[in-house]
Image (tube, rainbow, N blue to C red):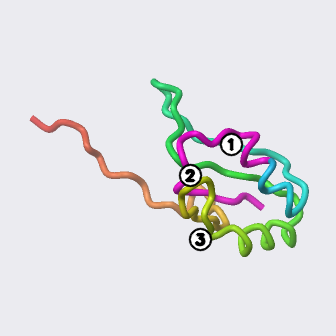
Amino acid sequence: MNIYVGNLPYSVTDSDLRQTFSEYGSVDQVNLITDKFSGESKGFGFVEMGNNTEADAAIKALNGTDYKGRNITVNQAKPKSDRPRGGGGGRRW
């Protein structure tokens, strides 16, 4: 199961997330989202866990909890096709 983790402190690393989620089961992959220009964290990421029971346990245990000073959001990630597309935002002359 792919898990969305939001409202993360900008100082959190991939290994921090892996360690936290591994307390609930096997972590297949961690992907912390960073700004492509600065390389700084954007404050959210994804954790992939192969066992859905373990993933559900992690979501229930961690959602809304204090993680290094911030209350994080943890839930099942939505597939890309289910997310609304972003608005234009480009210049119009």
In this rendering, which labeled residue sits more in front, label 1 or label 3?
A: 3
- The amino acid type of the residue labelled 3 equals Gly
SS for tag 1? strand
Name the one closer to the observer, 87 or 36.
36
Q: Is residue 13 left or right of residue 20?
A: left
Quarter of the image with the N terminus is bottom right
Instruction: Determine whether label 1 and label 2 are within 8 Å by CB.
Output: no
Given the image, on which type of amino acid does mark 2 rest?
Answer: Leu
**How far apart in space, not on screen, are marks 1 and 3 (Cα)?**
20 Å
Q: Give the distance between the C-alpha atoms of the residues marked 2 and 3, in whole angstroms.
A: 11 Å
Q: Position of residue 35 (x, y in %)?
A: 49, 33
Choose top left, top right, bottom left or bottom right for residue 50: bottom right
Q: Which segment did they paint magenta?
A: 1-18
Query: Dot 2 corresponds to which residue?
Result: 8
Please report contact status of discs 2 and 3: CB closer than 8 Å, yes or no: no
At which x and y percent is residue 64?
59, 71
Badge 1 is on which residue? 31
Q: Nearer the viewer, mark 1 or mark 2?
A: 2
